Image (cartoon, grey):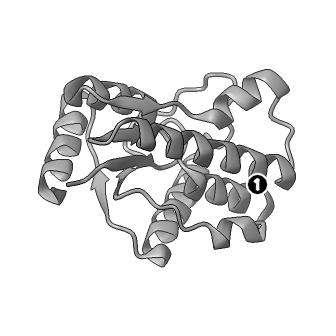
Amino acid sequence: MIQRICLHGPESTGKSTLATRLAAHYGCEVVPEYGRAYCEGHGTDIGMAELVHIAETQDAMNRAAAARDGDRVLFDTDPLITAVWAEMMFGTRDAYFDAFTGYADLYLLLDIDLPFVDDGLRVYAAPEQRRHFFTLCKAELDNRGVPYALIRGEGDIRYRAALEAIADAC
């Protein structure tokens, strides 16, 4: 059974919205995105050390939730997306990211087929930036060899695609 499901993809692709909806459907916990909370409290002018801190904290939150909920848990994000942020921001990454192996059982890679919504924290709005971010997200999953499903569409179409991908993986 697929226990740990992680939403993966660029900013403004509906990860948090979809995670909340899926958690309600499955009656399970969703672990929020620590990086968002961190940036809301500290600002977005961050370096590699802060990205590693964000990734380590997110991983600890995810592991704790998985230990609490033995059936299924949804991760809004995990250190793999923080590794992609490092690539986007700095063109490189800390060794922590390459050493990370605490993968989810299934990743839902959300496509950039939704309109970009600027919420004051998001950075990469230009179409070419979004495409590059998505390409890096997909490459991260491919290079790690982790199981994932590409999720496309808006609203209920996206939601049903995610439910189908989870059912297919079980």
Residue 38 image position (x, y, % from top left): 74, 30
Say how many tags the image has. 1
- At numbered mark 1, what does the secondary structure look like: helix, strand or loop? helix
Residue name at image x 65 percent, y 31 percent: 36
Q: Look at the picture and state if 139 lies above or below 59.
A: below
The residue shown at (26%, 22%) is 24
Looking at the image, is 126 positioned above or below residue 170?
Answer: above
The location of residue 51, given as percent across then percent down, is 76, 49
Q: Quadrant of residue 119?
A: top right
- Residue with the mark numbered 1: 89
Q: Position of residue 43 (x, y in %)?
A: 83, 28
The part of the image, by quadrant, that contains residue 169 is: bottom left
Q: In terms of depth relative to the viewer, which is nearer, 131 or 94?
A: 94
Q: Amino acid at mark 1?
A: Met
Quarter the C terminus occupies:
bottom left
Q: Evaluate whether residue 160 shows in this view.
A: yes
Q: Quadrant of the N terminus?
A: bottom left
Q: Is residue 151 left or right of residue 63?
A: left
**Residue 138 against residue 25 in the figure, above or below:** below
Q: Is residue 122 visible?
A: no
Q: How far from the left and from the top, in percent, is residue 14?
A: 42, 33
Residue at (65% x, 72% y) in the render? 99
Circle 1 residues within 10 Å: few <14, some 14–19, many ≥20: some
Identify the residue at image location x=69%, y=57%.
88
